[in-house]
Image (cartoon, rainbow, N blue to C red):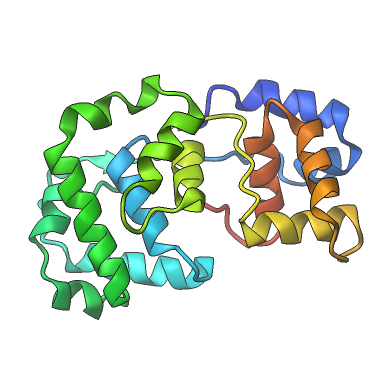
Amino acid sequence: MTPTYWPEAKAALRKRDKVLKTIIDSYRGEAMRLRGDPFFTLARSITGQQVSVKAADSVWNKLLAALPLPDSLPQAGEGIMITPGQIAAMDAKTLRACGLSERKVMYLHGLANHFLENKQQVKNWPTLPDDGIIRELVALHGIGRWTAEMFLIFGLGRPDVFPLDDLGLLKGIHRHYNKGKPLPLRKIIAIGENWRPYRSLGTWYMWRVLDPLPVAY
């Protein structure tokens, strides 16, 4: 599912930013895909922490293969929807064999248990502002601001997220706005300000130009 804001955001930033206009036009017909399931999105983001997109995909596919998935399991976006109960039931040895570090195994188990024990709280997330969701999520082990921001972008479809700790975003900005040379933080922030209130879209296109396939969490 594509975010509802996508067409309007794309049209607005094409008019406002010449660099972004060229990039957007290079990927006509492509758009970000939302996962639509909070646990799936957060678990996928934890898997992708501090590794390349290719490595994260490899670990994630092994995790999918290791799950006892019934044929009737519902789907989340373009992938299989993993549930908190399934992850909570998997032992650490099985998860480690998928390529997850010991710490990430602990994080996934903690996340699964949080979902199982706080079902109503999780249901309230779509009604909270971005900062409120970030504060709540970073209180969980293994979820830092970057992971919370990935959840806002890919899980809740929030339009104005600008993850300044994301190396892909910074690399894309350096490449396309300063010929590959590093920019000071204030200038990066200024580029993001020009994208408001659709910084999520600008961020996605900075990722898109770096990877052969669209980024998804």
In the rendered picture of this protein, how many numbered marks are placed on residues?
0
Give the answer, above or below, for where 186 lies relative to 5. Answer: below
Q: Measured from the top left, where is residue 85 in percent x and y?
A: 11, 49
Residue drawn 15% across the image and 49% down it: 113
* Quarter of the view holding residue 199: top right
Residue drawn 67% across the image and 45% down it: 203
Residue drawn 72% across the image and 29% down it: 10
Q: Nearer the viewer, residue 80 or 137?
A: 137
Q: Nearer the viewer, residue 79 or 96?
A: 96
Give the answer, above or below, for where 15 lies relative to 107. Answer: above
Q: Identify the image quadrant of the N terminus.
A: top left
On the question of residue 144 being in view, the answer is yes
18 vs 167, left or right, is right
Residue drawn 83% across the image and 47% down it: 186
Q: Measured from the top left, where is residue 69 in percent x and y?
A: 13, 56
* Quarter of the view holding residue 63: bottom left
102 vs 137, left or right, is left
Give the answer, above or below, for where 93 lies relative to 91. Answer: below
Q: Measured from the top left, where is residue 18 in percent x and y?
A: 90, 38
Q: Measured from the top left, where is residue 81 in percent x and y?
A: 25, 46
On the question of residue 34 being in view, the answer is no
